[in-house]
Amino acid sequence: MFPVIDKKETGLNLRRIMDRRGFTVKDVQEYLGLASVQSVYHWLNGISMPTIDNLYALSELFGLPIDEMVCGNRPRRNCAPMAKCEREKHLLAYYMKAHEKTAA
């Protein structure tokens, strides 16, 4: 089967990523230097996709590889609520905080 991007699912995934990282549509629009927020809303609603240049920039902004932002019909290792690496970082940060409190 030829791999195809699912615009709707990619939009939902971008929304989840933005929410998780605390970015607004306006933040993304300003970061990318877009004339209006309409393009970002079109991506989030699955109407269109960001250009590869914008995906590359979003990858930097979100701290994620492009492949974790784009969803399609090929077998996925990502598009999960939180990637394994992110969970491990979160758990390590939690452990370190808890350890600091018990050491004090």
Image (spheres, helix red, strand yellow):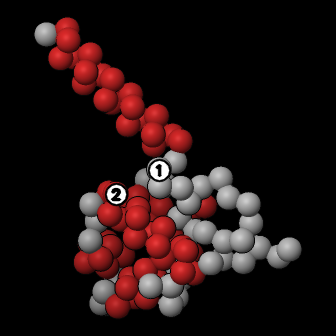
Q: Residue at x 45, y 43 (%)?
A: 86
Q: Type of residue at label 1?
A: Met
Q: Are marks 1 and 2 in contact (CB under 8 Å)?
A: yes
Residue wearing tag 2: 20
Task: Looking at this view, name the residue that lies furthest to the top.
Answer: 103
Q: Quadrant of residue 70?
A: bottom right
Residue wearing tag 1: 82
Instruction: State which tag comes first along the sequence, 1 or 2.
Output: 2
Quote the CA–CA distance across marks 1 and 2: 9 Å
Q: Quadrant of the N terminus?
A: bottom right
Q: Is residue 45 left or right of residue 97?
A: right
Q: Residue at x 43, y 80 (%)?
A: 44
Q: Is residue 16 left or right of residue 53?
A: left
Indicate the position of residue 91 as horizontal and vertical percent values. Answer: 39, 31
Q: Quadrant of the C terminus?
A: top left
Q: Quadrant of residue 34?
A: bottom left
Indicate the position of residue 100 as horizontal and vertical percent values. Answer: 21, 16
- Taking 67 as reference, is 86 above or below it? above
Q: Residue at x 38, y 82 (%)?
A: 40
- Taking 70 as reference, is 30 above or below it? below
Indicate the position of residue 38 as horizontal and vertical percent values. Answer: 35, 91
Determine the secondary structure under disc 2: helix
Q: Residue at x 52, y 48 (%)?
A: 83
The local crowd at label 2, few if under 14, some if 14 to 19, many if 20 or more residues have their Cα within 10 Å, is few
Q: Type of residue at label 2?
A: Arg
Asked whether the viewer can see residue 57, the reply is no
